[in-house]
Image (cartoon, helix red, strand yellow):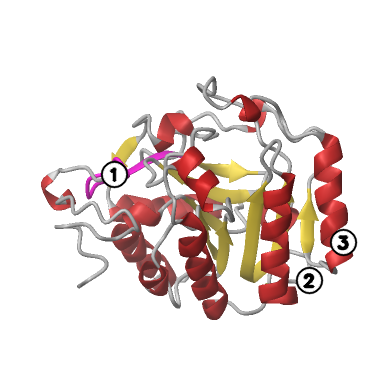
Amino acid sequence: MNILDLTACRLCPRECGADRTKGEKGVCGASDKIICARASLHLWEEPCLSGDKGSGTVFFSGCNMGCVFCQNGQISHGGKGIKISPQRLCEIFFELRDKGAHNINLVTAGHFLPQVIRAVEKAKVKNIGIPFVYNSSSYEKREAIAKCKGLIDIFLPDFKYMENENAKKYSNAFDYPEIAKEAIEEMVTQQPECIFDDGGLIERGVIVRHMMLPSHLRESKKIIKYLHDTYGDKIFISIMSQYTPVGNLEKFPELMNKVSKKDYDKLVDFAIELGVENAFIQEGEAAQESFIPEFSGEGIEG
């Protein structure tokens, strides 16, 4: 089976079998046409990605998960965005570079992987000269991530859940922990060391993000411990407190508040006690809806 064949799509763990080449949409909500909602310089990533000029973020529409708390709901399942070709996507990469982007940040691009690979390959041939970042939920097959070998310089995966029940409850993805472990292992296999330039910008490596959910301190501790026990100083861990309650959460009252400072501080202290040294933490008021970008189509149309 060709993992990149979209005629009976088995690209992601959902394996929905949609013939996306004939306009049929998969569980991710996408056909074989790339849909993007925004391309711009973004200053709210980890400091080694944003630098002083910004990360060149390209937000792709659609998603194979169903997180009830999704911060980008209007594009993940709202269908908002503009159809573009792989050629246009490649042009966008260079436009972001010419605006000063330190890197090209592909945000939730996994369901368009065949098309994205073509665009990245073309940009590399044309010597774009800045790193590519693969920003992922980690709910992706290891075989799909393997297709990125030699193309992606920096992997930026989430690790959302360690407990299957919560993965099912909040994202309809009971097998998320097992899938994410495999995907991240492949990412680290491809980029086993974090390398930075003289200015502190990351050039290669893996940064695993964990966004803490309110009232889920125990699960967050399990995730940090797993990552540190498994990878040690090979990776950086980004411990995030920016969860913002958005959308219809009446059925999930435990998610209707922000993460408490007390719980977040406990998680950071736990990481320090474990011996985690390569980490990013968030200080101050990170949980604000104003940090969620406006998906207006900026930078997408030529």
Q: Position of residue 197 (x, y in %)?
A: 73, 71
Q: Secondary structure at mark 1?
A: loop
Q: Is residue 217 left or right of residue 298?
A: right
Q: CA separation, marks 1 and 2?
A: 43 Å
Considering depth in this image, is 141 or 298 the residue closer to the camera? 141
Up the image or down, 143 lies above or below 27; here it is below
Percent position (x, y) of residue 132? 52, 63
Whether 276 is drawn above or below 246: the answer is below
Residue tagged 1: 27
Residue identified by numbered label 3? 272
Q: Secondary structure at mark 3?
A: helix
Q: Identify the image quadrant of residue 253.
A: top right
| Quarter of the image with the N terminus in it | bottom left
In the rendered image, which residue does mark 2 sit on?
A: 198
- The numbered mark at residue 234 is none
Going by the numbered disc 2, the residue's amino acid type is Asp
- Report the span colored magenta: 28-38
Give the amino acid at mark 3: Ile
User: Mark 2 near mark 3, Cβ–Cβ under 8 Å?
Assistant: no
**Residue 30 located within the stretch drawn in magenta:** yes
- Name the residue furthest left: 22
